[in-house]
Amino acid sequence: MSVPHARGYLLLRRGGGLWGIANAAIDGLVRRGADYRITIGDSGGNGSGVLAADEILGVVEDLRVWPLAPVVRRFWPQPAAGLAVHGGEPVVVVDPGRPPAALQSGDGEDGGEGDRPDEGLEGRQGRE
């Protein structure tokens, strides 16, 4: 069960992107082979799902999160709770009630389409 009073954000990499998930929404974290599976739920206990990560970077307690501006929403098709910057890199903050397809593992309740790390991010990374 997620811990509503947990502080900070778990930072992870998936498909070359940097993502953040509020610690309060995380129900579990396990390593499976070369990647990780993160079980989440929103703060109300809804929206549970299993997300995948290529790498876990750690927890950041003082991450400043900004809401998505309308212009960003127009060009970013995935749901997100906001954006942040950590170590000079942009971080997409996950909305636990609507996790992005790019993080869905395909083996949980989220109905993901598989483990393609770049699913839903083609042409938006600029680094690959």
Image (cartoon, rainbow, N blue to C red):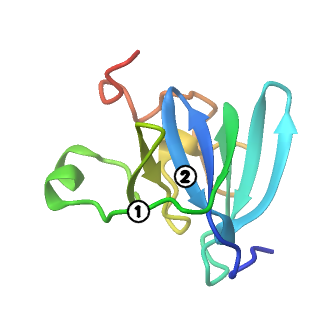
Q: Where is residue 37 drawn, in percent x and y?
A: 76, 45
Gap in angstroms between the C-alphas marked 1 and 2 = 10 Å
Tell me the tag on residue 65. Answer: 1
Residue type at mark 2 is Gly
Residue at numbered disc 2:
20
Q: Where is residue 21 drawn, in percent x and y?
A: 58, 57
Determine whether 43 is above or below 34 in the image: below
Q: Where is residue 16 drawn, in percent x and y?
A: 50, 26
Question: Which of the 4 image quadrants contains residue 109?
Answer: bottom right
Residue type at mark 1 is Val
Foreground residue among 46 and 29: 29
Question: Which of the 4 image quadrants contains residue 107?
Answer: top right
* Residue contact between numbered discs 1 and 2, judged by CB atoms under 8 Å: yes
| Of callouts 1 and 2, the N-terminal one | 2
At x 57% / y 43%, what residue is drawn?
103
Query: Which quadrant is the C terminus positioned in?
Result: top left
Q: Where is residue 86 drawn, in percent x and y?
A: 47, 45
Compared across the picture, whether 83 is left or right of 68 comes to: right
Number of on-image labels:
2
Question: Which of the 4 image quadrants contains residue 60?
Answer: bottom right
At x 61% / y 62%, what residue is drawn?
61
